[in-house]
Image (tube, helix red, strand yellow):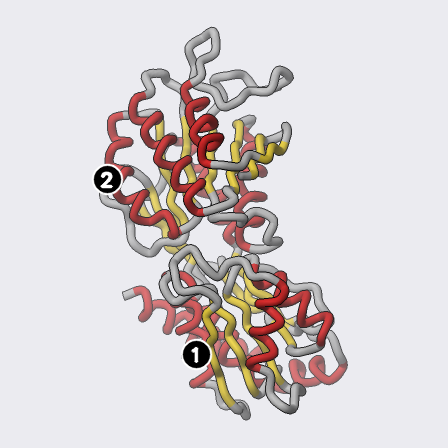
Amino acid sequence: MRIKFFRYNTVQIFGLLLVMSLALMLSACTKDGDVIYMVDPNDPQPSDSPLIVAVYDANAVGDCSYNDLIYKGIENVAVKYGARAMQISPSSFSEGKAFLEKAFAQAVTATDTLRRLFIVTSTAYDSLVRANNKHLESNSYTDLLYLETPKPLEGKGSTLFVDYYGAMYEAGYFAPLFGKSILVAAANPVNESVSNAVSAFADGFNDSPYEKNKLKTEYIGSKIDEGFSISDSAAVQLLNSNAEDNLDGQLIVPICGSSSNTIARISDNTQFYRIVGIDRVMNSSLSDFSVVKHIDKAVSETIEQWMNTGTMEKHRRLGIAAGYTSVVFHPHSNDFENIVNKYITQETLDIVLKKAIEMEGQNEH
């Protein structure tokens, strides 16, 4: 388990026993009776500074994408408000689950007045969150923010969902201009955010008027916490098994978290596919457009609301209409620059954006 203490040390902890030991530290008290989290002796923040505790999916931090954007958003708020942030990237799903179970239990029994905000970044913990959030109602100083779920929590806690449908629809619409045959490499079919993005891309592809060959989806994993990381050998096998005899004109869309970094690196080395950037603008000679999710902005805004008012909106759903997702074109060759200039005019962008907003609204209901 990798744990980041804001402004302090990064510590590697492995094994369930050590996870339990760490969780027990949630109840360690200062001389003033405040609950603290492994405070550094040189901690410049007072012990009563609000605590922001974020728990990620297994090995999620360091993906240079969605999870790192959340990480950045949390630390930016911590800097601005002088809060303390503890960001936990477990080495396995079971470690993350064990930490959350212990953290929920400790928060329920805490009797101090320290303000705590728990942030759960992955729907892999969905059943655990929904089974425990009501228990937090006994502690008025503790709150919960649950990300990436379109379904509000019953009882205590807020949810934040940045809807990818509109942006993915737009990406699917324009994708045939950059590759006639398209492979969507998706993490798993169970994760709702992933399946939503896959469906949206297919809808845009099917509505596209541009010449196209085929669209195929391959799932890396089968369970809700699988497919977000992939070995080099598995990535090579994935690309090889789906490669056409004529590689020219193939495009890969990696909707798979950290796995997208491995797939992009293999693609760069082998020139198998051109690749679509996901969550942030991809800097690669093989990438000509990206689907961007401003999750860092959405998370920062929500935490700031909690810092300033002590409350958060019960459920916040953001998307392409509000500017929290977008498609960014960044052609890396004259040929693709000419394609963008010829086919992706402002008039066309406006028409497709209007349709994407409409489709996202329909998907919401």
Residue 169, horizontal then vertical, whole percent: 45, 74
Q: 71 or 338: which is nearer to us? A: 71
Q: In this view, does 171 lie to the left or right of 194?
A: right
Residue at position x 64%, y 86% from top?
249
Whether residue 161 is situated above or below residue 178 in the rendered picture = above
Q: Mark 2 = which residue?
A: 155
Q: Compared to 116, does 282 lie above or below?
A: below
Q: Does residue 351 show up?
A: no
Gap in angstroms between the C-alphas marked 1 and 2: 35 Å
Residue at 45 percent of width and 26 percent of height? 21
From this viewpoint, which residue is outermost toward the right? 334
- The disc labelled 1 sits on which kind of residue? Ala
* Residue at the (34%, 67%) spot, across then down: 361
Q: Nearer the viewer, residue 264 or 305?
A: 264
Q: Which amino acid does label 2 sit on?
A: Gly
Residue furthest top in the image = 31
Q: Is mark 1 on a helix, strand or loop?
A: helix
Which disc number belongs to residue 161?
A: none
Give the mark, 1 or 2, whose residue is nearer the N terminus. 2
| 21 vs 202: above or below | above
Residue 64 place in picture, x, y as percent: 62, 53
Q: Quadrant of the C terminus?
A: bottom left
Percent position (x, y) of residue 218?
47, 74
- The mark found on residue 202 in the picture is 1
Return the x and y of residue 240 as percentages of the image width and height. Answer: 61, 79
